Image (spheres, grey):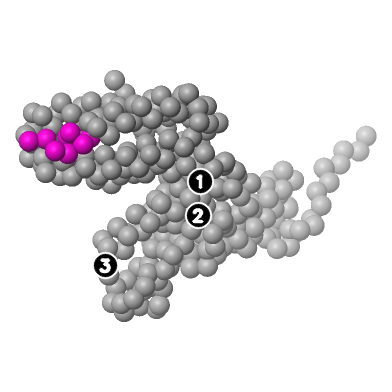
Amino acid sequence: MVTRAPYCSPRGLAAVATLLALAAVGCSEAAEVVDDAKDGAKKAARQRSVFSLDVGDCYNPNGKAEGEAYLVEVVPCDEAHQGEVVSEFAFEGGAGYPGDEKIVGIADERCAAEAQKYAPDTWALPAGVGPSHYTPTRESWATGDRTVSCTYTSEKGTFKGSLNTAESFEPDQLTFLKGSNAVYETLWAHQPVTDDVEAALKDYKAQAKAVAAALGSHVEELDGIEGAEVGELRATLTKAAGQWGKAANAPDADVFYVAYDQAFTLIDPNRTVPARKELGLATTVPAEDAQVWAP
């Protein structure tokens, strides 16, 4: 009997190794070398400058998602990826660099709004995915860079598929989501930096005033949507708006505490679940919100 070594085709190996390498490794190891080389070549071919990203591009950062970046790997959205570009805008006017704080502040505000236009039902987002952005640095600003790329980015891990769902909603669904998103965005955008309510009572009252206004608009828009559960939610949010208004006009901290406690409880996102179900929207409260309102 003649025993032969398994056949191993050298095709394709020339790009990564000479045929001499096959003498030192088995066929399976050689195949791994080829596969690794193919993966490396594919990744290299997909490299794009962050300055050339387009809305709808799905990508993987090179290295950490935070910090300065110049290149990313753009991939088909049906492959696992960490980020997706949802919008872009350019800073206007002024030759001088506005400073990191101003740049990031404007990007945070505008990108949060743009992200919700791209994927209106934030409850339907994959776990850990939230708004982020690529902004000009002082150095790139000096070369004429003024563009901010707004993204949805996974904090940990990856997700598959595009998050662009804006065209999949009915008018009533979009009306509900726009108002609901505005209420919670207003709440956190005006959250005072300290939890010492008495020391920052003025700031807490300003927050209450802003939330009361957002709720008022939301309640008014809900009036045009049919459905028993939507009607129940509208009644609850009307009470909530009243309590936030009382908190905003509280003469002292004691009165504020009573109104604020009731106001905060009445906008518990769990209370919106029946109306969301009635409207055909996602009904699982995001983990971050669930923790805030946990008993």
In the rendering, which numbered label is found on residue 107?
none
Q: Considering the numbered disc 1 on the image, is that residue within a helix, a strand or a loop?
A: loop
Q: Which residue is mark 1?
A: 119
Question: Percent x, y for residue 203?
Answer: 15, 44
Provide the residue span drawn in magenta: 244-251
- Residue at image position (42%, 60%) is 134
- Say if mark 2 contacts mark 1, CB within 8 Å: yes
Question: Percent x, y for residue 15?
Answer: 70, 63
Distance in Å between CA atoms under marks 2 and 1: 9 Å
Main secondary structure along the magenta-highlighted residues: helix
* Left or right: 54, with 66 as reference point: right
- Residue at image position (43%, 35%) is 223
- For marks 2 and 3 on the same chain, the one whose residue lies earlier in the sequence: 2
Q: Residue furthest top?
A: 295
Along the viewing direction, whichever of 209 and 32 lies nearer the viewer: 209
Give the amino acid type for the residue marked by disc 2 in the picture: Val
- Say if mark 2 contacts mark 3, CB within 8 Å: no
Q: Is residue 128 visible?
A: no
Q: Is residue 247 magenta?
A: yes
Dot 3 alpha-carbon crowd within 10 angstroms: few under 14, some 14 to 19, many 20 or more: few
Q: Which residue is mark 3?
A: 99
Question: Percent x, y for residue 288?
Answer: 36, 34
